Image (tube, rainbow, N blue to C red):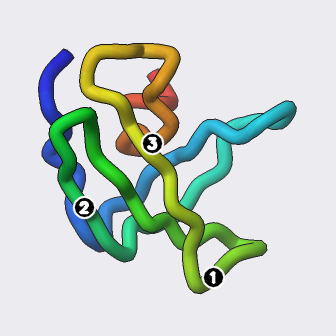
Amino acid sequence: MMRSTMKVNDLVTVKTDGGPRREGVILAVEAFNEGTMYLVALEEYPTGVWFFNEIDSRDGTFVEPRSAANQ
């Protein structure tokens, strides 16, 4: 899996438990060896929630660019 090029202010969707994907905006990005953490502002959490995308696991991908998630 390719490392993400998503950055602050990008419009994204996030996968959450038991519901449809939610739209949000990236507030911060932190890279780690195992993947990338994204702080995403959601309508009900405007100050942001952290989500982790694992590098080598499609099941571990929670944040995607809005256009990629809608295809």
Q: Taking 55 as reference, is 9 above or below it?
A: below
Residue 10 lies left or right of residue 33; in this view the side is right
| Residue, disc 3 | 63
Label 3 CA crowd tier, 10 Å (few <14, some 14–19, many 20+): many
Q: Which residue corresponds to the image point at 19% horizontal and 53% vertical from the top-left?
A: 31
- Front position in the image: 42 or 36: 36
| For residue 28, above or below residue 47 | above
Q: Name the residue under label 1.
A: 46
Q: Distance between the residues labelled 2 and 1?
A: 19 Å
Q: Is mark 3 on a helix, strand or loop?
A: strand
Image-quadrant location for residue 41: bottom right
Q: Which of 47 and 70 is in front in this view?
A: 47
Q: Going 14% across and 45% down the picture, which residue do you hit? A: 5
Look at label 2 and name its amino acid. Answer: Glu
Q: Distance between the residues labelled 3 and 2?
A: 13 Å
Going from N to C along the chain, the mark reached first, 3 or 2, is 2
> Residue at 31% of width from left, 62% of height from top?
10
